[in-house]
Amino acid sequence: MAERHLIALDLDGTLLKDDKTISLKTKDILKKAKDAGHIIMIATGRPYRSSEMYYHELELDTPIVNFNGAFMHHPRNPGWGFFHEPLDVKVAKEIVDACRSFQFHNIIAEVMDDVYFHYHDEKLLDIFGMGKPKVTTGDLSNFLKDSPTSLLIHTEEDELRLIRQHLSEIHAEVIEQRSWAAPWHVIEIIKSGINKAVGLKKAADFFNIPAERVVAFGDEDNDLEMIEYAGHGIAMGNAIDQLKNIANDVTLTNEKDGVGVYIADLLHLK
């Protein structure tokens, strides 16, 4: 057989169509790749609870990267290891206090599957309620006791820049920060040095696959390190320009089977 490749898939805007489903064509090609001996895994900013249905739908038997690398485990093999790198709770509380000088809609802290809302928020509850987490609402300075896996600040576009600027002046050493794609003006914060590539490299080492046989697909700025690390770093047709600029290649959009079409071509699958 051809040499084994490790294929890492981002979910939103990449593997998933805009309606959050996996197309039959792409699913079929992924199954063929798996049957041919290639290794397929998910690397997402989502928590495990809101990505596990896709893990099971693809019948994967691989580790999964969640929270952009802040959490990694192997759902079918508890002995594989359990990597959790949360943001120091002291830093999280300093950020919450700093936000009081800015305009923001909400701050959400996730401690694995527990979700803490600074303010009650029906709109965001829909996004975070997937997989039925335990939800606590109230001032994070009082309610947040554990180091959060990730911290999210929901604000407006012009405030987003100001808050990000403040964070990079004060906390650059200890955090990684990203912005979500429109329409959500959200700043996502995790512990510094953590990103999807860190998790992907753990998997590649485990399966003994060199970086040149790692294929990674993404569309957003939380995919940058992963796309850079992979020998085949592929940006979706709908990806941000920054990602397309550093990618080895650009495929079709998430609506046009970009992942499936590219894999079929690269691995010569019928």
Image (cartoon, grey):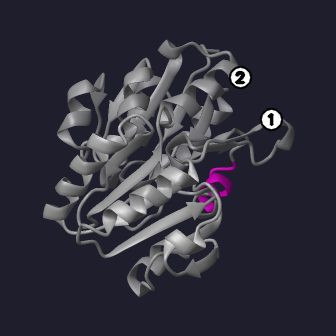
Q: Which mark is residue 161?
A: none
Image check: 252 left or right of 157?
A: right
- Residue 270 appears anywhere in the view: no
SS class, disc 1: helix
Quarter-of-image position of residue 53: bottom right
- Toward the left, the furthest residue is 158
Would you say residue 144 sits in the magenta stretch? no
Amino acid residing under circle 2 = Phe
Quarter-of-image position of residue 237: top left
Up-down: is 77 above or below 141?
above
Q: Picture coordinates of residue 22 (x, y %)?
A: 48, 57
Up-down: is 17 above or below 14?
below
Magenta segment:
52-59
Amino acid residing under circle 1 = Trp
Q: Quadrant of the N terminus?
A: top right
- Toward the right, the furthest residue is 79
User: Residue at point 31% right, 48% down?
Assistant: 167
Q: Picture coordinates of residue 87 (x, y %)?
A: 54, 48
Q: Picture coordinates of residue 235 (x, y %)?
A: 31, 35
Q: Which residue is mark 2?
A: 206
Q: Are marks 1 and 2 in contact (CB under 8 Å)?
A: yes
User: Residue at point 43% right, 22% down?
Assistant: 229
Q: Which residue is mark 1?
A: 80
Residue situated in front as seen by the camera: 151 or 75: 151
Residue situated in front as seen by the camera: 185 or 161: 161
- Residue 132 appears anywhere in the view: yes
Image check: 229 left or right of 250?
A: right
Predominant SS along the magenta part: helix
User: Residue at point 59% right, 47% down?
Assistant: 86
